[in-house]
């Protein structure tokens, strides 16, 4: 028998932000969906339930009339379903195909990684967050979009302002103002370059949008570029750091990976499972229904916690451990279903084949800095916010 | 109903009755056929629904889009002439009696 969504009012956002995994475990054990009062949303945390949700977007929609994201960024493909979604998704695909990533983007990403490492390789210590992961992700995304003359710091700041705006449920006026300013700056950066791609198509995302069979309108371009800036920067940044952190914490695994560079790919994939950069994303219940053991009502907002499902003990043995060598099996770090991450192959290449291997290759005796411990934060988005390392020069 | 026979890497065979209009991937999952992961559930984005279709009957299948063609090069197992993403192939009468072989790994 399906029971109503149980209420958990002793789980605070502060606790989730510090370390969501103990709370996620409690939620998984409690029910298929749990109302967390402090977060004001029904959280879905079990692997199998999330698969059910992702396989049935008729009952569990991405379209969301009241979405703050639509207000902040415009109506992007992330908040559309069915045909409307597919048309836009197909339009951007050419920039994201694995073959295009390999042949076109790899040399670009390679050069960026080397240039960044050149700048600190002689210093013997650095915080990889600011010196490497953040600029790497931002510079690569800048190239992929096709912007010119946008500083990586600006792109990163716009991304943060948009993400803050989306999670600011109308409470802090300055956050809304900053998000609106970022949105205007992005529109201007698009206007500054768009014409150059009209007659000269290339692999950039802006070019793909213009030259698709169903070309994007300017409103679609603006909204989808914003969603790509909001969702294509922090995740590669965080997964670079999490992969490095996982390997540095586990010297035996690190040694095996360094000895066989093919293993950087599973090392990356395991990092995305272990500390999923997107821990939670929303869906809306379209009609009264049952999910697993829980009854849901039309209009209920669900938070799909892939960060929790990726630690589901019914699916992964010893789920809290970082283990490059665990049995190959599906994880949900890139989502599932129609909105499965469009940037999956970009991230695999950028992080798993370029950023992380290059770092270990060029800083062969890199270690965690004992005096300055790494710090991780977040639950909707999660990753290291500081990763100080040392090496001998 | 359209009969499709799935062959596992170990040679074991299983015939299912597929619903026209579904994709071959959906038909396989609906009948709990092992060997297809379908991480992206049909978005042509994951290449974990790779399968080898009967090579002498490929002409009867939905045409392959450029995107699928690119993606197939990155499937976990080698690409062969019968390789398709099973989520991009619709079940039609043209598939009746077809065999589809699953790769070692997705
Ligand atoms: C390790 C890195 C990454 C992770 C873990 C990740 C994760 C995700 C997840 C979980 C979703 C699904 C969200 C939902 O269903 O609501 C998603 C969607 C998306 N991601 Fe990623 N992502 C990563 C990298 C990237 C990159 C580098 C880009 C772009 C350059 C990107 C672009 C997108 C886009 C455009 C969507 C929306 C797809 C759609 O709605 O059809 N992602 N990502
Ligand atoms: S299910 Fe992902 S490509 Fe077919």
Image (cartoon, rainbow, N blue to C red):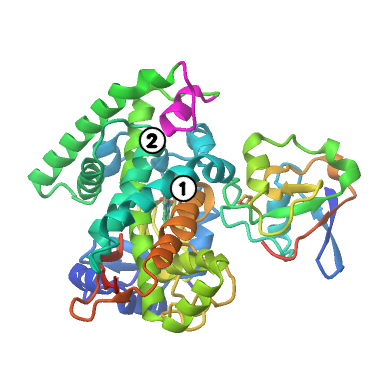
Q: Secondary structure at mark 1?
A: loop
Is residue A44 covered in magenta?
no
Q: Is residue A228 shown above or below A362?
A: above
Q: Secondary structure at mark 2?
A: helix
Q: Residue furthest top?
A: A199
Is residue A209 covered in magenta?
yes
- Residue drawn at point x = 48 percent, y = 44 percent: A107
Q: Is residue A230 visible?
A: yes
Sequence-first disc among 2 and 1: 2
Residue behind mark 2: A145
Other residues around mark 1 within 10 Å, as few (<14) / some (14–19) / many (≥20):
many
How many marks on residues? 2
- The response on whether ligand 1 sits within 8 Å of label 1 is yes
Q: Is residue A48 left or right of residue A389?
A: right
Circles 2 and 1 on the same subunit: yes
Q: Nearer the viewer, residue A153 or A28?
A: A153
Q: Nearer the viewer, residue A73 or A342?
A: A342
Q: Is residue A256 left or right of residue A379?
A: right
Chain identity of mark 2: A
Chain identity of mark 1: A
Q: Which mark is residue A343?
A: 1
Quadrant of the image occupied by residue A328 = bottom right
Other residues around mark 2 within 10 Å, as few (<14) / some (14–19) / many (≥20):
some
Where is residue A204? Give x, y as percent. Answer: 44, 32
Q: Nearer the viewer, residue A48 or A266?
A: A266
Residues shaded magenta: A199-212
């Amino acid at each position: 028998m399906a029971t109503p969504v149980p209420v958990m009012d002793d789980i605070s956002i502060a606790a989730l932000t510090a370390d969501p995994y103990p709370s996620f475990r409690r939620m998984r054990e409690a029910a298929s969906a749990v109302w967390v009062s402090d977060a004001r949303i029904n959280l879905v945390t079990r692997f199998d339930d999330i698969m059910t949700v992702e396989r049935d977007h008729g009952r569990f929609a991405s379209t969301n009339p009241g979405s703050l994201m639509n207000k902040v960024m415009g109506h992007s493909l992330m908040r559309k379903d069915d045909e409307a979604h597919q048309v836009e998704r197909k339009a951007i695909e050419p920039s994201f195909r694995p073959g295009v990533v390999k042949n076109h983007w790899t040399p670009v990403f390679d050069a960026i990684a080397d240039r960044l490492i050149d700048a600190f390789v002689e210093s013997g210590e650095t915080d990889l967050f600011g010196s490497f992961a953040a600029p790497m992700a931002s510079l690569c995304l800048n190239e992929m979009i096709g912007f010119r003359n946008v500083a990586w710091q600006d792109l990163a700041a716009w991304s943060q302002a948009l993400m803050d705006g989306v999670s600011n449920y109308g409470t802090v006026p300055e956050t809304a103002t900053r998000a609106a300013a970022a949105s205007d700056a992005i529109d201007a950066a698009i206007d500054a370059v768009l014409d150059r791609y009209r007659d000269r198509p290339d692999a950039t995302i802006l070019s793909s949008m213009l030259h698709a069979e169903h070309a994007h309108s300017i409103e679609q371009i603006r909204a989808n570029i914003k969603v790509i800036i909001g969702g294509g920067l922090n995740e590669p940044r965080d997964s670079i750091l999490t992969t490095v952190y996982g390997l540095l914490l586990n010297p035996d695994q690190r040694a095996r990976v360094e000895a066989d560079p093919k293993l950087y790919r599973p090392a990356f994939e395991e990092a995305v499972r272990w500390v999923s950069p997107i821990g939670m994303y929303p869906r809306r219940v379209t009609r009264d229904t049952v999910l697993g053991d829980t009854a849901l009502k039309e209009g209920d907002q669900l938070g799909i916690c892939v960060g929790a499902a990726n630690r589901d003990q019914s699916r992964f043995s010893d789920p809290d451990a970082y283990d490059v060598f665990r049995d190959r099996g599906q994880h949900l770090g890139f989502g599932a279903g129609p909105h499965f991450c469009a940037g999956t192959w970009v991230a695999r290449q950028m992080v798993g084949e370029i950023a992380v291997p290059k770092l270990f290759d060029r800083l062969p005796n890199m270690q965690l800095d004992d005096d300055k411990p790494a710090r991780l934060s977040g639950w909707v988005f999660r990753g290291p916010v500081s990763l100080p390392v040392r090496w001998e020069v | 109903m359209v009969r499709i026979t799935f062959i596992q890497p170990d040679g074991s065979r299983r015939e299912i009755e597929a619903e026209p209009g579904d994709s071959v991937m959906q038909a396989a999952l609906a009948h709990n056929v092992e060997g297809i992961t379908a991480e992206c559930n049909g978005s042509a984005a994951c290449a974990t629904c790779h399968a080898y279709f009967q090579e002498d009957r490929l002409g009867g299948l939905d045409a392959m889009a450029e995107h699928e063609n690119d993606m197939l090069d990155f499937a976990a197992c080698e690409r062969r002439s019968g390789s398709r993403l099973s989520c991009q192939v619709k079940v039609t009468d043209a598939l009746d009696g077809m065999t589809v072989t699953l790769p070692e790994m997705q």
